[in-house]
Amino acid sequence: MRPAEIDEREADDSAAAAIADKPRLWRAMLFAHQPDRHGRCITCIGAPWPCGPRTLAERAEEIHRKS
């Protein structure tokens, strides 16, 4: 990994940890950020799926389940 990728991963983990104890939030994010038939997020118009919010919510769920 490049240093920038490591910094980005650490930032993502920090954001996910911040919402891990808010299951209503990350569950709503998981529900809202689904792929369409073309592999794009239905909420983040045009963004490839999984989008950033979906990935964040999945990581928050993972952290929540481990705690």
Image (cartoon, rainbow, N blue to C red):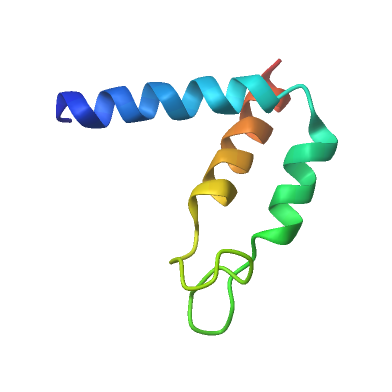
Name, please, the residue furthest toward the bottom: 37
Q: Quadrant of residue 17?
A: top right
Name, please, the residue furthest toward the left: 2
Q: Residue 34's spot in the image, x, y percent?
A: 64, 65
Q: Quadrant of the N terminus?
A: top left
- Vertical arrangement, residue 27 with respect to residue 50, above or below: above
Say which residue appears at 49% left-offset and 83% top-offset: 38
Say which residue appears at 54% left-offset and 71% top-offset: 45
- Vertical arrangement, residue 46 with respect to residue 28, above or below: below
Q: Residue 11's spot in the image, x, y percent?
A: 42, 24
Q: In which quarter of the image is the C terminus?
A: top right
Is residue 12 toward the left or the right of residue 35 in the image?
Answer: left
- Vertical arrangement, residue 45 with respect to residue 65, above or below: below
Label count reads 0
Is residue 48 toward the left or the right of residue 16 in the image?
Answer: left
Of 43 and 24, which appears nearest the observer?
Answer: 43
Say which residue appears at 63% left-offset and 31% top-offset: 60
Is residue 34 toward the left or the right of residue 11 in the image?
Answer: right
Name, please, the residue furthest toward the right: 24
Q: Residue 6's spot in the image, x, y percent?
A: 27, 24
Say which residue appears at 79% left-offset and 28% top-offset: 22
